[in-house]
């Protein structure tokens, strides 16, 4: 649902921005619609999960882009966010479309005040409890979140075009950047300098530019996840479902997984919790039940484990251990990650749509 709404929004973005300009227009003045003066930063508290008030910093740009930073929290759905915003003609509400199922709704109370609304379009708190207020300046916040976008490397100048906003950023050569660069340069089917879809836990932070003074928003690769040649941002914006899905196993505990000596590709098929799962490391399927509660997941040990040739025994053992240790899951685009109880990554899998 969220993806369809984003696509509809992007399709009419040009017309929408003309109507939802952050600068007062003659038409808006005649209708008396409240206006925003942008670009600007808004700060205050927003409800999220079980929290009635979480500190938030929202940056809005007149091109329809937003960044939302929140205070650190382990609650699902309370992470930082980036994306596109829109405002319909005749409405005092802006909608923020980011990486969540439903857009965040904010009412324009005044040129420098936004008020959080609940899913039904009513104020989320009493009075001004959940207002975001601006002093008229833009002071960009750093945001940390899973990032999906088109990565390109040429002449020691890596760039990253983030999928949700369409914005392009330079990439800092720090943290886990080297893992991304090595994977990119190791691709044999990609022309030098070609853009390839990449996913990683990252940060958009202010960094000094290559030339000149001041700072520019820059992408920092915190934890490399994977490269997906042949995929595009359009597909990445459509989040795969966890169940009723065929998942190709890409890596297990950081080690690449794949067919060995003509064997089948390692796979995990989730048929829905009522029908269980089946998995295959390349030498025969094994199956069991699994349970999902929110972002928590548990796999039951298979009743029968097929024998494996020597070349595949290690991969089968690794897949079995991952299923045994998995306690949490996360999907970004077409990529599923499994995590253990402390939150350490166990496996990366890619959705495959069978014809």
Image (cartoon, rainbow, N blue to C red):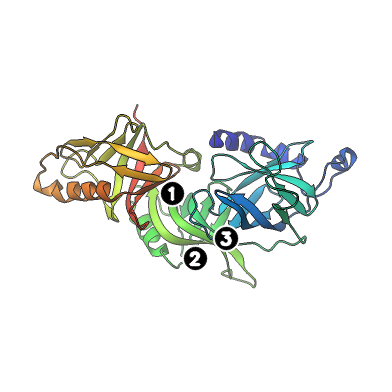
Position of residue 260 relative to residue 201, above or below, is above
Horizontal side of 330 relative to 212 (left or right) equals left
**Which residue is drawn at the image coordinates 53% and 60% (left, top)?**
72
Of labels 2 and 3, earlier in sequence is 3
Observer able to see residue 15: yes
What residue is disc 1 on? Answer: 196
Image quadrant occupied by the N terminus: top right
Q: Quadrant of residue 105?
A: top right
Residue 255: percent from left, percent from top: 26, 55
Q: CB atoms at circles 1 and 2 under 8 Å apart?
A: no
Residue 55: percent from left, percent from top: 62, 59
**Which residue is drawn at the image coordinates 88% and 43% (left, top)?**
29
**Disc 2, SS:** loop
Horizontal side of 355 relative to 100 (left or right) equals left
In the rendered image, the residue lying farthest to the right is 30
Q: Residues within 10 Å of mark 2 (few under 14, many from 20)?
A: some
CA gap, disc 3 and disc 1 = 32 Å
For residue 53, the mark is none
**Which residue is drawn at the image coordinates 13% and 39% (left, top)?**
306
What residue is disc 2 on? Answer: 172
Along the line of sight, the residue nearer the viewer: 216 or 88: 88
Observer able to see residue 257: no
Q: Quadrant of residue 30?
A: top right
In the rendered image, the residue lying farthest to the top is 355
CA gap, disc 1 and disc 2 = 17 Å
Q: Residues within 10 Å of mark 1 (few under 14, many from 20)?
A: many
Residue 13: percent from left, percent from top: 67, 39
Of labels 3 and 1, earlier in sequence is 3
Residue 217: percent from left, percent from top: 59, 62
What residue is disc 3 on? Answer: 71
């Amino acid at each position: 649902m969220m993806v369809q709404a984003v696509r509809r929004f992007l399709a009419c973005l040009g017309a929408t921005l003309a109507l939802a300009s952050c600068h007062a227009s003659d038409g808006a003045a005649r209708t008396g619609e409240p206006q925003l003066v942008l670009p600007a930063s808004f700060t205050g508290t927003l409800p999220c999960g079980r929290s009635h008030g979480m500190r938030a910093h929202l940056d809005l740009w007149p091109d329809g882009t937003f960044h939302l930073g929140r205070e650190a929290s382990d609650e699902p759905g309370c992470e930082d966010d980036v994306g596109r915003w829109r405002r319909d003609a005749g409405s005092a509400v802006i909608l923020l479309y980011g990486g969540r199922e439903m857009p965040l709704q904010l009412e324009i109370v005044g040129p420098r005040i936004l008020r959080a609304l609940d899913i039904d379009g009513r104020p989320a708190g009493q009075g001004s409890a959940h207002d975001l207020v601006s002093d008229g300046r833009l002071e960009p916040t750093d945001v940390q979140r899973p990032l999906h976008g088109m990565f390109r490397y040429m002449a020691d100048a890596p760039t990253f075009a983030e999928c949700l906003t369409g914005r392009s950023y330079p990439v800092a050569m720090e943290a886990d950047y080297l893992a991304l660069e090595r994977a990119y340069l190791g691709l044999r089917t990609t022309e030098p300098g070609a853009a390839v879809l990449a996913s990683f836990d990252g940060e958009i932070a202010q960094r000094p530019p290559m030339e000149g003074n001041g700072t520019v928003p820059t992408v920092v690769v915190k934890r490399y996840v994977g490269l997906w040649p042949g995929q595009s941002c359009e597909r990445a914006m459509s989040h795969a479902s966890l169940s009723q899905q065929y998942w190709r196993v890409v890596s297990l505990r950081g080690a690449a997984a794949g067919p060995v000596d003509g064997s089948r590709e390692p796979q995990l098929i989730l048929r829905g919790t009522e029908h269980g799962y089946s998995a295959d490391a390349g030498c025969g399927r094994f199956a069991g039940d699994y349970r999902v509660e929110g972002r928590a997941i548990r796999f039951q040990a298979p009743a029968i484990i097929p024998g494996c040739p020597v070349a595949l025994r290690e991969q089968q053992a690794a897949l079995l251990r991952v299923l045994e240790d998995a306690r949490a899951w996360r999907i970004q685009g077409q990529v599923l990650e499994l995590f253990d109880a402390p939150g350490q990554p166990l496996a990366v899998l890619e959705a495959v749509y069978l014809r």
